[in-house]
Amino acid sequence: MDYDFRAIEQKWQQRWDAAHAYKVANPSEKDDRTTSKKPYYVLDMFPYPSGAGLHVGHPLGYIASDIVARYKRQQGFRVLHPMGFDAYGLPAEQYAIQTGQHPEVTTKRNIARYIEQLRAIGFCYDWDREVRTCSPDFYRWTQWIFEQMFNSYYDSEKQQARPISELVSRWEKEDPTWSQLSEKEQQERLMQYRIAYLADTKVNWCPALGTVLANDEVSEGLSVRGGHPVEQRVMRQWCWRVSAYAQRLLDGLDTIDWSESLKDTQRNWIGRSEGAEMQFRIKGQAEPFTIFTTRADTLFGVTFMVLAPESEYVSRVLTDEHKQEVEQYLLRCRRRTERERIADRQVTGVFTGSYAIHPITGNEIPIYISDYVLAGYGTGAIMAVPAHDSRDYAFAKHFNLPIIPLIEGADVSEQSWDAKEGKMINSDFLNGLTVKEAIAKMKQYISEKGIGRVKVNYRLRDAIFSRQRYWGEPFPVYYKDNMPYLIPEDCLPLCLPEVSDFHPTADGQPPLGHADLWAWDEKNRKVVSRSLIDNQTVYPIELCTMPGFAGSSFYFLRYMDNHNDKELVSREANRYWQAVNLYIGGTEHATGHLIYSRFCNKFLYDLGYACEDEPFKKLINQGMIQGRSNFVYRYTGDDSDGNLYVSYNLIDTPPYKNKVQPIHVDINIVKNDILDIAAFRSWSPDYAKARFVYSDGTVDEDNPYIGTPTQKQYICGWAVEKMSKSMYNVVNPDDIVANYGADTLRMYEMFLGPLEMSKPWDTNGIDGVHRFLRKLWNMYEAPADGEPTKEELRSLHKLIKKITWDIDNYSFNTSIPAFMIAQSELQQLACNKRAVLEQIAVVIAPYAPHIAEAMWERCGHTDFVIDQPWPTWDEQYLEESGVKYPVQFNGKMRFVITLPKTMGKEEVERAVLEAEETRKFLVGGTPKRVIVVPGKIVNIVL
RNA sequence: GCCGCGGUGGUGGAAUCGGUAGACACGAAGGACUUAAAAUCCUUUGGCCAGUGAUGGCUGUGCGGGUUCAAGUCCCGCCCGCGGUACCA
């Protein structure tokens, strides 16, 4: 019978569904980790359900994790392998603005499509555990976590989050000023400590999207989503105090099994730098100002100071004489967008008229303002050492300021010497020391003299948590006297209200400003109409919503216990599953999701809601699947009518050379780079009159040939690009499933190459994998009883060993050839032994579960192959009596000799030297040395 | 600029601990079957050279050095591609 993959896949998907084969229950309460099955948690980064559906790039990681999940299950683990949807976000809302369709409607539709696509591929997800961030029974916990953060502060001594009530009771005892503060003043003070807090911050404002964006949502001054310009603004925003966890986020990296490159990306993003803060007096003022430097050793080379334009020190150093100039400069800085600043690297700045006093020499140092100093880092003020910092150097050259070299032999006439190498000069008591010694000595000196202190700074900033958008989690917050108060925990979830319009309001409020039912009745503890706001018992509710990373920062915990309506996750469920054993997803989340969720998890850990400090024990980044685009080449010569297309092999030959324009062509009308000419002509009216210069150079007006080389062909060019609609190179998994089956898709995606590497999707090779499955299927025509032969067992056990090694090492690509080789060996042996065939079905089940079930059934079973225990291999079947020794002469392989396995080093040497072939290659000479690696190789040195 | 990853046939890739480079698959070429085509099967397939041929020789993993009996793999110095990041003091 033919390999009817459609029937097979449909049948087994239905059977799995009917049997709830992928349902994973938590162990009952009396079970614990020692009595129950061991847990294993395999997680995929949940997708944002876009309108375009899945393309073949998305399932790559899902297939890999599915293989691991199935393998672990067969090894006897209880495997948690859930899937859900990161369903809030900008695209659905942008679409709503354009079309007027409610984002909930489009989101639901998109999710339904995603589920359909995912089901077709045969993943072993337990759909009972599905979560969606936009559903109230999920975002209730998003809001709950926000409330916990609001009610917590970071105790820097204990290095953990603590209830803010502890801080209040400490102040009540120890700080007499506390009780004298008004309620509002107390709230304001507490706000400076809360882990979720409200603050005036400089934000990335994106006018086109009408919202604020987090740093990781902005790249090179443009929004990551949509590519709109972003500018700087100061706004009152909710923030997550991620920076408090900087050190722990850094230290935790040493305890987890992630790729070095991903850890490095996080380390750079956290950006720890050890340095010193130093006080400089301002001439004529009592109060000093503070700068941060990592090069305390260069204190004797300071020739000017620089403040960030937004620095609070600016107002203090303003002199009447320079006031106008400075204000003009500040205005100019404020007007510039981030993008302009990045694009235009010219040195700019202005002198304030004030001077600082050098803390050791007492010299007067001019104070400048320049936007190369950032307000958000360190103290927003620096001491400039032009000889040893390239930015200071450029500034000094521009304003003609003195440059004092501090390192012996450093030539600073053309550029600064930034390296921390060399011996100090011109530096008083530091002279003669190395840079490293000098840094240490100066730190000690300034600490002792009270000039400054040792300080560690982090680049990591707090995360801005407000979005001026509709399609997100509402903040459970209302405002009394302009101060935020929480909606009581037992009133959650605070559901997203309906709005008449998804645009901002006329007065510039976020879309929730259109909602009528959006006021909090404190007395009756419920949401009421805004018309009832009296600021006595009814108050306005926050109009912003939460950002995308709110829900994705903890969803992995919720899967453990997703139907629990009392707790985020029960203690038992959390203790059982603990943390994600294997997390697979793309690198694009390196500095966003993977920082925020580590932070959020650490916070929940501090409060005792999560039992593991790090949420993702092992993480693999799957590579991107790029598109493989095809091109046709339109002739653009002077005599062209715009309808002539030149075959790719001729575009560099006259008369077409440099006179063709590449045009993307839909990859669906190209096969093996040969264009389907009829399809091309009907693809678009623009090409209806297309004529072609075929690969053999003939110009043919209207002969739509395609096929064998005896006929005329048009060869397309190709390139590897991002997979996107506009490049006509999107490949949809549904089409592959329809044409080849899910098992072929799964195996082919793995076959493409190592999971972590980026690679282009090239459908050309898929036939080989499909052919293999068909050949394998044909071997199951009539499984027979009988003892397998030695050779058959060797093939089988070689395969078991290989596949086990591969999955344990996440080397999925190398498994496919192993299956192919086993199939071809067994076919040559004409093997039809049930004992062998059923084991093949068991080990291929993680990769190709549908055909594996059908093969298992053909072997006479009525249960599921996916529940069969993972086999072990027996080395005795792998042993061969003889060893094939490659024999090298001077490192060059000459021949292979087979010798008994039992032979020792000397015997092998003797046997090789006596061999007929050896004499030929010695050509009479005597070997200088013979290297024998037993069981491996022989090398004869002449 | 800095950090990370990569570079192996026409293509995707294999070589897992320094030990036969190119497994496996695609593509291509030739052949079988067929009225024909599709499908299927068989053979060949890194490059160069010699030979009618079996075969043999040289060369070959981005480039240049080095370590080693032996290097795609380790070390040093470059080149190229991809990704991330950037006035972070």
Image: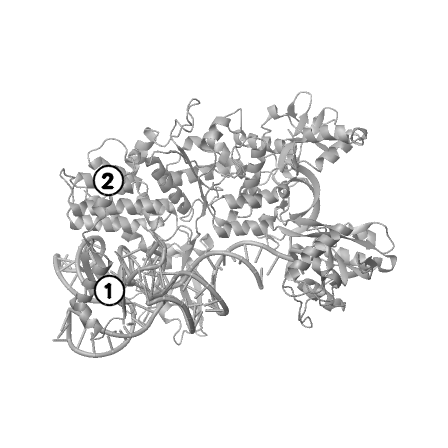
In the depicted view, which residue is nearer to us: A554 or A613?
A613
User: Which amino acid type is shown beneath numbered disc 2?
Assistant: Gln
- Above or below, A554 relative to A247: above
Horizontally, residue A826 falls left or right of residue A241, namely left
Q: Position of residue A225 (x, y in %)?
A: 55, 49
Q: Is residue A3 visible?
A: yes
Residue at figure coordinates x 47%, y 49% from the top left? A259
Quarter of the picture containing the N terminus of chain A is top left
Q: Position of residue A438 (x, y in %)?
A: 68, 59
Mark whose residue sits in front, 1 or 2: 1
Q: Residues within 10 Å of mark 2 (few under 14, many from 20)?
A: many
Q: Position of residue A738 (x, y in %)?
A: 32, 45
Q: Chain of mark 2?
A: A
Quarter of the picture containing the C terminus of chain A is bottom left
Q: Is residue A223 visible?
A: no
Q: Position of residue A220 (x, y in %)?
A: 60, 55
Mark before the other along the chain sequence, 1 or 2 = 2
User: Which amino acid type is shown beneath numbered disc 1?
Assistant: Val
Number of numbered discs on residues: 2
Q: Secondary structure at mark 1?
A: strand
- Above or below, A130 relative to A228: above
Residue at figure coordinates x 58%, y 34% from the top left? A606
In the depicted view, which residue is nearer to us: B43 or A478?
B43
Q: Chain of mark 1?
A: A
Horizontally, residue A916 falls left or right of residue A238, namely left
Place residue A77 in its image quadrant.
Answer: top left
On whether disc 1 and disc 2 are found on a single subunit, the reply is yes
Q: Secondary structure at mark 2?
A: helix
Instruction: Provide the residue designation for mark 1.
Output: A887
Instruction: Provide the residue designation for mark 2.
Output: A839
